[in-house]
Amino acid sequence: MVANGISNGDGKSVPREIETRLFINNEFVKAQKEGTFEVINPATEEITAHVQEATNADVELAVAAAEAAFPAWSELGGFQRAAYFYKLADLFEQHNDQLALLEAVSMGRPVSTYTEGLASARFLRYMAGKATDIQGESSLQTAGFVNITLRQPYGVCAAITPWNAPVTMMTFKMGPAVIAGNTLIAKSSEKAPLTSLLIAKLVKEAGFPPGVINILNGHGALCGAALSAHPRIRKISFTGSVRAGKAILEAAAKSNLKKVTLELGGKSPLIIFEDADVVSAAEAAAKSILLNSGQACIASSRVYVHESIADTIGKELVRVLKSQGSNPQEGNDPLLPTTRRGPQATEGQFTSILGYFSEAKEAGYEILCGGKQEGRKGFFIEPTVIFKADEQSRVMKEEVFGPVICLSVFTDEKEVLKRANDSEYGLYASVYTHDIKRALRVAKTFEAGNVGVNVTSPMMTHDMPFGGWKQSGIGQELGVYSVREWTELKTIYMAL
Ligand code: NAD
């Protein structure tokens, strides 16, 4: 553990102990092989914590603990498992402010906008309700037989999560995996591991039996690779980049062919037709790209606007983006209640975005606003609109993961749909129009797992499935689908 001074948001420094160890079998333990990694505060560029790094030996311990816990946990009734979830949900709610502080000093998320603890509490309660919804089917369609199916947990499972929404991503996996009767080893991102360790503390406080939920810190190449290739882990769920998703799929194939669910990246199009409500469309586009400083897989990063309203939308977008600024006079501190927008979470992320800006400038694209670093300290980027970038350019094809909109102009519905779908990603797509027939036509034609009609991301709900088409993913999270993804199906044939 390290003791660190964290401001409480009123500018005061409150010494707080930050947990940095691994959580195995309901105990906080040091990594077996001496080793730590640094977590950097992206607003100050100072070290927040040195965190214990899990390697193969720690993964083995966690697998043994999860294996030992599985028989009793999977034999519990749904209501009994749900009781733990309700306690955990209450604790999430009570600790939202502490989660916010930890996220602020590890990934720069402003405390003023932080609600992940509250939203995750709601999700855990929803999942608790799903405990008794895990059912098979029956068939009398074969003469002389009654045939039934059972949905059963896999056993020991794993989850690997990204840094951009650490608490949400952890609960999206932990919730359905554990309510379905599996035991779990979750690895947090090396860039934002601190809230996962607070979750571990809450898991223990909620009274979960040892070994049901284990949480490891570490890098993808060490801990992540060990989990993906482990011969006794039967299912793994991953959220992160396409690159890492492919590595996990490959490791799963080469080891024990464990089942893999992948939630990967996005380059989401938003089409605004000439009959749309221009102000609400521009506001929605700005809100979508500013969420988490653009570090969201679902961000509407490609905006296509009909030529007749291109000028108005462009001006409106710039106005809203500028009004949703950070707080340069007060140093943009994510811990201050007045800061609305934080820095990019890491230096790598920050440098990568500046690289896209250099390319855009070299190509001669018009930049309607932004296009550079904001302030002098920390990894802040100005909200940016790049106008009419080449459809095949890197900034139009790749996930920038920053507050950067590519604004393009179209004249014809068919043509714009072709351009919108010309992407290897297919996570989220949106359309703004008052013409219901056109809305449905466009929604049907989008090649994406999620579509917004007169709304855009981050619109999503706990009870509806969320997943990506094409290289945006495999499988679904949320809703009843997520619980199904964490169960094996068995058919039983019974002769009469
Ligand atoms: P990342 O892929 O670099 O890392 C994600 C996690 O994978 C981390 O825990 C990392 O340690 C681990 N990892 C990396 N390489 C690995 C390997 N070879 N084997 C096993 N584990 C490995 O991604 P990131 O930079 O943390 O997150 C940003 C990405 O996540 C973006 O592409 C974003 O779009 C995506 N994302 C997707 C969703 C979604 O639901 N579709 C949600 C949030 C983020």
Image (cartoon, rainbow, N blue to C red):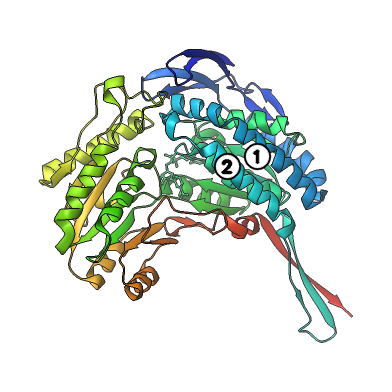
Can the viewer see residue 426 in this picture?
Answer: no
Left or right: 255, with 130 as reference point: left
Kind of residue sitting beneath label 1: Ala
Asked which quadrant contains residue 327, the reply is: top left
Query: Badge 1, how many Cα within 10 Å: few under 14, some, many 20+?
Result: many
Q: Does residue 350 lie above or below 286 as drawn?
A: above
- Mark 2: give few (<14), some (14-19) or many (20+) Cα within 10 Å: many
Residue at coordinates 60% horizontally, 45% vertically from top-left? 122
Q: In x, y percent, where is residue 475?
A: 54, 58
Pointer 2 residue? 120
Circles 2 and 1, Cβ within 8 Å, touching? The answer is yes
Outermost bottom residue: 143
- SS assignment at label 2: helix
**Which residue corresponds to the image point at 81% horizontal and 46% vertical from the top-left?**
71
Identity, as a three-letter code, of the amino acid under mark 2 = Ser
**Residue at the right extreme, as displayed:** 496
| Left or right placement of residue 247 versus residue 346 in this view | right
Q: Sequence-wise, which precedes: disc 2 or disc 1?
A: 1
Q: Residue at x 31, y 21 (%)?
A: 331
Task: Please give the name of the residue rendered at 57% of the width and 42% of the height, measured from the top-left corner.
Answer: 120
- Establish whether ligand 1 lies closer than 8 Å to the Cβ of label 2: no
Label 1 C-beta lies within 8 Å of the nearest ligand 1 atom: no
Label 2, label 1: how far apart the Cα atoms are? 7 Å
**Nearer to the camera, 255 or 197:** 197
- From the image, which quarter does the C terminus lie in? bottom right
Q: 179 above or below 422?
A: above
Q: Secondary structure at mark 1?
A: helix
Q: Position of residue 326 (x, y in %)?
A: 30, 31
Q: How many marks?
A: 2
Task: Check residue 89 in the rendering and tell me which mark sits there, or answer none.
Answer: 1
